[in-house]
Image (cartoon, helix red, strand yellow):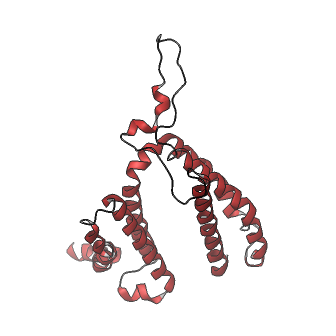
Amino acid sequence: MSVSSALFQHLTALIECSVAAIVTLLVSDPVGSLQIRSCKVKMLSDWYTMLYNPSPDYVTTIHCTHEAVYPLYTIVFIYYAFCLVLMMLLRPLLVKKIACGLGKSDRFKSIYAALYFFPILTLLQAVGGGLLYYAFPYIILVLSLVTLAVYMSASEVETFKDLLVRKKRLIVLFSHWVLHAYGIVSISKLNYQDLPLLALVPAPALFYLLTAKYTEPSRILSEGANGH
């Protein structure tokens, strides 16, 4: 797969997700607005009201509970549905557009992958929606740190010069910085006293670049051999 074809696919996926998010907000209450009107979340059990259906006689369960955090729970399913619809409408046109740059086995891989991921994501939201609501800032922060370290290690980035050699590496770095900043802002909940923490966004990358030479496997092995 050519670089331009891969970039085009990522750009199309970004457009699909962005349009799906906007449409989801527009069809949610209040309809036609990019804002949502929701009930306040007070505790984790608010997300799982179906577990608290009453049983007056301790035999028959009355299924009368409703979504206490409406629409924060169901809006995610609506978003996934719009993502799936837009993907099925736009992705075949994309594949036809860039078919010349893809092998026969690569043309529909992105569609097949999404058909696997969407059910998994839906199940995660159905089971762990409340946990994700409280933990997603920390999940984003940790995953962005881990994936940045893995990428820089796999790309053999050990110095600032290695980082500047290819524009793709800078794009990946800045993308992770955006995720770092988003995680910090989410944790701080726009508390202006905590916003100076955004200055720490470049810290993980700087720490990696400054210490990478000390953790080079060949250097560790050579020093171990010399020590013996």
* Residue 121 at least partly seen: no
Residue at 46% in and 77% down = 155
Q: Is residue 96 above or below residue 114?
A: below
The residue nearer to you, when weighing 81 against 171, is 81
Q: Find residue 82 and report its image quarter.
A: bottom right
Q: How far across and down, in percent of the image, does residue 90 sit?
A: 73, 66
Foreground pick, 220 / 63: 63
Dividing the picture into quarters, in which one does residue 43 lie? top left
Would residue 115 be found to the left or right of residue 122 on screen?
Answer: right
Relative horizontal placement of residue 207, taking residue 120 as reference (left or right): left
Rendered location of residue 166, percent (x, y):
49, 86
Residue 125 coordinates in the image, percent (x, y): 52, 46
- Asked if one can make out residue 198 in the rendered structure from this viewpoint, the answer is yes
Q: Which residue corresponds to the image point at 34% horizontal and 73% vertical from the top-left?
A: 217
In the displayed structure, would residue 24 be above or below residue 102?
above
Identify the residue at image location x=37%, y=60%.
186
User: Which residue is found at the position 43% from the left and 77% from the top?
Assistant: 174
